[in-house]
Amino acid sequence: MADRTRTRGMRSGKPGGAPDGARELARELADAVRGEVSSAAGDRALMTMDASNYRRVPRAVVAPRDEEDVAAVLRVCRERGVPVVPRGGGTSIAGQATGVGVVLDFTRHLRRIVALDAEAGTAVVQPGVVLDDLRAAAGAHGLTFGPDPSTHSRCTLGGMIGNNSCGSHSVAWGTTADSVRELEVLTYGGERLRAGRGAAALDALPQRLRDGVRTLVDGDLALLRTGYPELPRRISGYALDALLPEQGTDLARALTGSEGTLGVLTEATVGLVRPPAAKVLAVLGYVDESAAAEAAHTLLPYRPLTVEGMAADLVGNAAGLPKGGAWLFVEMGGGTPAEALARAEELCRGASTTDHTVVTDPARQRALWRVREDASGTATRMPDGSEAWPGWEDCAVPPARLGAYLRDFRELLGQYGLRGTPYGHFGDGCIHVRIDFDLLTAPGIRRFREFSCDLGDLVVAHGGSLSGEHGDGQARAELLPKMYGTELVGLFERFKDLWDPAGGLNPGMLVRPDRMDENLRFAPLPERPVDVEFGYPHDGGDFSAAVRRCVGVAKCRTTAPGTSAVMCPSYRATGEERHSTRGRARLLHEMLAGEVVTDGWRSEEVRDALDLCLSCKGCRSDCPVGVDMATYKAEFLHHHYAGRLRPAAHYSMGRLPRWLRAAAPVAPLLNALARTPLAGAGKRLGGIAPQRAIPELAAEPFVRWWAKRASTGAPRWAPRWASTGAPTGGGAADGEGAHSGAGAPSGAGAADAPPVLLWPDTFTNYLAPEVGRAAVHVLESAGLAVRLPAAGRPRKPLCCGLTWVSTGQLDQARTVMRRTLDALDPLLTDGTPLTVLEPSCAAALRTDLPELLSDDPRAARLAASVRTFAQTLEEQAPGWEPPRVDRPAVGQTHCHQHAVLGEAAEQRLRARAGLAGGLSGGCCGLAGNFGFERGHYEVSVACAEEQLLPSVREAEPGTEVLADGFSCRTQIGQLTDRRARHLAEVLAEALPPRG
C-alpha cells in the first residue's frame, strides 16, 4: 500500500500521480484498519473505471477485512471530508462503481457466506460474495438465488443489492429487491442499523432516521402512491414507494438499488428459491426482433422461467438456432424431464413462430446460453468492427409495449444516424443495447447527449423506466425528472440528505448527479494513434482502440475454471485484479491517459501487472470483446526495454532458437552438465527458476534425422514440387542439418500424393524429435507426401519468432519472420498446407506473424496455410482411417490451440482412434518461457493444479496422457510421474511397423 502492505494484493510503492494529501490519507487509513490500504498509482488506476463509459480517479483504495474496518474508513473519511465509494465486482455499466474519494473493495475479504438456512430458504452473506459462490452453496440444498445477471460468475451480492440487479430468470423470481430480507448498513455518519420489513424495523432505526423517514412518507403519501410507473423492471430512482404502509414499510427494499449513496452494506440476509428439478430450453424463431418483442408477453401465461430475446445482427452465425431473424429463449421447468419437455412443447404449440426447437441436452443449453451471456461484450463491436458503447443499456417498458417501443427506438436511432443491436429480457420489457456513439469528439459527445435526452422522452412516453436493471448512476440519473417529475425527484434528494447529510457516499450518482457527458473515460486518451509495432488489424492499427476493447464486463475474473475456457489463469491463481485481463487493460488505459500512470511505456506498474501474464492468448478467444493481452504485453515489453538492459530470461529463453542451434553439436555434453551442480549457476545466470529441471537436448535433431533418412533413399515425389522452384537440398529449418535432400518430399504412395509441408519448429527439432518422426510416419501412412522447408545459404535459422514475440523483442522477431516468409512463400503458392506440430508455433504463424508483418501481403498467405496435425489429416486425407487405440485419455488442450486454432479436428481424430474422454481446459501454467522464469514457479504450478494435474493424477493405469504442446508435456513430466505424448506419437505407435 502506499507505505505499508499487510497481505498479498495491493502493493506498496510510489504513489505516482497521487492527488494532494493522498499519502497522508493512506497513512491515516492504514493506521485505522487491518485490511490493505493503497494510494499507489497502480492500485488507484485499477479502480478508475467500471463497465460503463465513465472514469474517476480515486484518492485511495481500501480492502476492509470486516465491519470494523468499514466503520474506521468512514470515520477517517468523514473527518477529512473525503467521499467513500463501495465497490463490488466493478461490472456496473452506469458509472456508480467509480469515484474520486476512497474506494472500498469488498472482493478481497468480505466475501463470506455467514450462514445458510435451507429450511427457511435464506442465506446471510457479506457484500463481496460472488453470486455463483452463493448459488453453488445453495445448490447443495436444492436451492438457488433467483436473480442471475449474465455476470453471475463474478458479480457480487453487494453490487447486486446496490443496483437491484435482475437477470434472465426475473420473469419467475423477480429482481434482487424481491429476494432481500434484511440489510446491515453503516451510514457515512457512523450509524449502524439493520434495515428490514415492517413497522418494527422502522422503529429500530436511530431516532433521527426513524422520524425523518416517517415525516417524508406521511407528508407525501399521494405522490408516493401515484408517482411510480407499474412495470416489472422499474429500477430507476429510490424505491420510496416500498415505505408505504400497504407495501409493508419495507426499508430493506427501499435501500436496495440505492447505489451506495445512502449507506455502506456490510451484511445481507437474502431469500433463496427452489428451482424446478428439470429444465428444458425452447428456442422460438421469429421474422424479426419486433415480431419476437410482440410475442414475448403472450408467453408469460405459460409460466416460463425465462423469456430472453436477441436478433440476428447480434448472433451473427445462427448455427444451431431455428429459422428466423430473431429468437426468444424460453426456459420451462418441471418436476421431471418429461414434465418440463411437455410444458415446452405446449408452449411451442401455442406460440406463432417461423420455426422452433426444444433443447433438452444440458451441454447444448449451456452453449446457447453462453451466446446470450456474452452479448454484453460481443455487442460492443458492430458487424463492421466499429465500436459501440453502453449508456442506454437497460431501459424497460411494460412488456406489452415492447414491440411498439422497439420500433420507435429503431426509428430514433435512424434519425441520429446511430446503430445498435437490442437484446435482453423481452419477457420483462427490458432491453439491452450498445450503440455506436462517438464518444471521442465534441460533436459526437453532443449527439450522444441529444440522443439520450430524446430517448429518455421516448421511454417515458411508453410508460417505462430509464433503468431496468443496472441502475441510474451517472448514465441516466440526470434524466430522472423526465420520468418522475421534479417533485418526486425532490423527495429523492430529501431522502438522500436524511441518510447522508454530508453527501459523502458516492456523490454525483442518482441524486444531484453529474452530467451524463462528463467524466467520460475516453477523454484523457491520446487524440492520435501512438506508434506501435503490431498492426492491430481489428482496431484500425490504433493501440488505444485495442485497449478500449475492454469494457469491464470482467469475464476474466471468473474464479471457477471452465473445461472449454482458458482466460484468465493468472487471475485464478492470484485472485488479484491487476493480474486479470481487465486489470491489465485498465493499467494500459491509464498508461495511455498519463494522469495516474505517468511514466508511459516505462511504467513499472504496467510492467509488474504484465509480468504474471502467461501470454496464453486465452483472452483472444474467451473475452467477449476479443482483448488480446498477449499481443499487448509483447508490444509493451518492446517499448519498455527499448535501449535498456532486459531481464536475463529474455536473453536466455527469448532467444532460445539461437541457443539450441548452437548447442546441438554438443548436446550430450550439455545434458551431462545439466545434471551437475553447475546447472544451478547456469539457471541463475539465465534467470531460470531454480525449481525447474533443464529439458534434455535431443542427441539427433529432427531435421538431421530427416536429412539422413532422405539420403538413404526415401521415396520422392519431385515432379509435384518441381514447378514451385523449391530447393531439394540446403540447410533445414532453424539452420540445422544442411544435408543433400534435406528438403525433399517423402511418402508411401503414388507420385501425385497430396503434398504436405511439415514445419520443424524449434521445440520439435531440438527437444522432441520423436514427435516429428511420429508425425512423418502417420502422414505418410495416410498417403501424404511430406516435405520440410529448407533454409538458404549461408545457413540461417527459420523460426516462427514465438520466443522473441513473447519477450517483446519485436525487431528481432520481425527479422526472423521475414526470413521465414522468404523461405516458405514459394512453397505455398499452390495451396500446400503448412503442418505445424507445436500449437504455440502454429498460433504464432497464424496470428503474430501477419500482425507484426502487416505490411507484407505474403504474411496473410502464410497464415492461411497453417494447419495442425489433425487438420492436415482431415483435409488432405479424408478417407484415411486412423489406427484404433481404444483407451481412455486425459491431458491438456494447448491454450494457444484453444484460442487461435480450435481443436475440433483433434477431437474428431481422437474419437475415430478410440481415445475416449475430454482433455482439460485452462492453461498448463508453463506457457513457454513463463513457467521457467525466476519468480513464476508458484503461479505456474497453481495454474497446473487447477485442472491438468488433478486429471492426470486421478487417471487410471493405462490411460493415455495427451498433450500436443511441448510446454504442456514438460509441465506434466516435471510435476507428475506420468509421461505425456503428442497425438502423433500415440497414433504412430499403433500403426503397423514401417516396411
Image: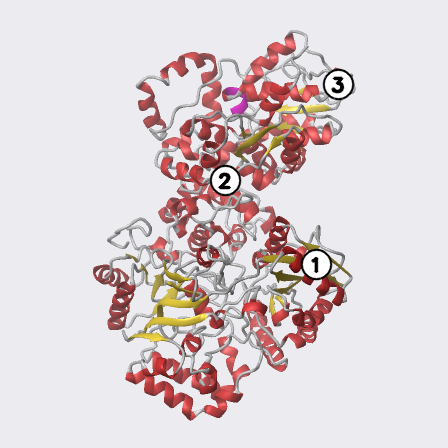
Image coords of residue 272 (percent x, y): 47, 65
Q: Amino acid at mark 2?
A: Cys
Q: CA distance from mark 1 to mark 2?
A: 31 Å
**Number of residues whose C-alpha sits closer than 10 Å to that of mark 1, classed few (under 14), some (14–19) or many (20 or more):** some
Q: Residue at x 75, y 24 (%)?
A: 754
| Place of residue 134 in the rendered image (x, y in percent of width and height, measured from the top left) | 44, 58
Disc 3 marks a residue whose amino acid type is: Ala
Q: Visible in this render: residue 506?
A: no
Please say if 265 is above or below 363: below
Q: Farthest residue toward the left?
A: 31
For the N terminus, the image quarter is bottom left
Depicted 499 relative to depicted 113: above or below: below
Q: Outermost residue toward the top? A: 712
Number of the front mark, 1 or 3: 1
Give the mark nearest the N terminus, 1 or 2: 1
Q: In the image shown, does 413 or 174 lie closer to the viewer?
A: 174
Q: Residues at badges 2 and 3 in contact (C-beta under 8 Å)?
A: no
Q: Quadrant of residue 460?
A: bottom right
Instruction: Sort mark 3 into few (<14), some (14-19) or many (20+) by Cα contacts within 10 Å.
Output: few
Q: Which residue is mark 1?
A: 312
For the C terminus, which image quadrant?
Answer: top right
Q: Is residue 910 above or below residue 663?
A: below
Rendered image quadrant of residue 269: bottom left
Badge 2 density bin: few <14, some 14–19, many ≥20, Cα 10 Å = many
Q: Which mark is residue 616?
A: 2
Q: Which segment did they paint magenta?
A: 762-766
Residue at (72% x, 64% y) in the render = 346
Which marked residue is nearer to the observer: mark 2 or mark 3?
Answer: 2
Looking at the image, how many numbered discs can be counted on the residues? 3
Does residue 301 appear left or right of residue 380 in this picture? right
SS for tag 3? Answer: helix
Give me the C-alpha separation between circle 1 and circle 3.
49 Å
